[in-house]
Amino acid sequence: MRSRFLSVDALAGATTDHQVLDPHSVLISRFATLGEGNVFYPGVVIQSDEDSVLTVGSHNVFYPGAFLLAENGGHLEIGSHGSYGPGGVQLKADARGTAIVVGDRVRLTNGPEIVGATSIGDGGQLIGPIRAQSVQIAGGGDHTEPDVDRRAGVLKGVGLARGTRVEVGEVVNGLGNFADARVERQSVYHPRA
């Protein structure tokens, strides 16, 4: 039986298209489709089976502990120019009909776990050890956008966010159960931006 992952030699050879900082500790499925110019820190896992779709765009940075999974007919689509970590991040599309779609210029950091039918638009952010189940984060400008009312939605804090929707210019800062968290304008957090 052939391995589902690229060999160390194949990963070492991928350095012409990507920066694989430690080919001995990075696992990338041979069923995944990658763009170009991605950076893979040690300990990154990109796992897929032949019945699923896992695509990664270009020029992303995957910090240690980044884990991407598409199995059992799941669909995981990652855009370009995103930041996945530091602090670990897990994206798991592990059931038929489950699609996780992540746009460009996103920032997922400090331990979020993303499962279920989820959409994170361009520039969206998830910050903190959040278990995000079937969330919708509206796309907009990324965290460097000077007009905070035009920035993509932000979900931050710790706990369970199930079915949460965050629109452009909004932030939800939760502790425990995000169903109890208030939706606020990002301008509250960045009044001088």
Image (spheres, rainbow, N blue to C red):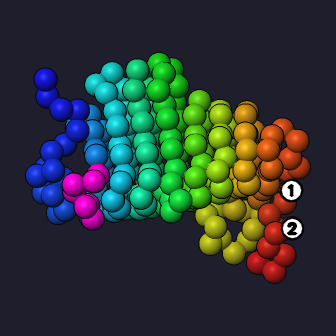
Q: Is residue 143 visible?
A: yes
- On residue 184, the disc is 1
Q: Position of residue 63 (x, y in %)?
A: 43, 60
- In the rendered view, tell whether residue 177 sits above or below residue 43: above
Element at label 1: strand
- In the rendered view, tell whether residue 172 sits above or below residue 191: above
Which of 92 and 137 lies nearest the eye of the viewer? 92
Q: Residues within 10 Å of mark 1 (few under 14, many from 20)?
A: some
Query: Are discs 2 and 1 less than 8 Å apart at CB?
Result: yes
Q: Residue at x 11, y 52 (%)?
A: 9
Q: Residue at x 62, y 72 (%)?
A: 144
Question: Does the magenta run of residues contain 60?
Answer: no
Looking at the rendering, which quadrant does residue 143 occupy?
Answer: bottom right
Type of residue at label 2? Val
Q: Residues within 10 Å of mark 2 (few under 14, many from 20)?
A: few
Please state if 133 lies on the left or on the right of 66 as rendered.
right
Query: In which quadrant of the rendered image does the N terminus lie?
Result: top left
Q: Is residue 139 visible?
A: no
Query: In which quadrant of the rendered image does the C terminus lie?
Result: bottom right
Q: Residue at x 48, y 21 (%)?
A: 95
Q: Position of residue 175 (x, y in %)?
A: 80, 50
Please state if 124 lies on the left or on the right of 186 as rendered.
left
Q: Main secondary structure of the magenta part?
A: loop
Looking at the rendering, which quadrant does residue 60 occupy?
Answer: bottom left
Task: Determine the residue located farthest toward the bottom in the rendered image.
Answer: 192
Which contiguous range is marked in magenta?
20-26
Q: Disc 2 designates what residue?
A: 188
Please state if 64 lies on the left or on the right of 144 as rendered.
left
Q: Position of residue 137 (x, y in %)?
A: 67, 46
Type of residue at label 1? Glu
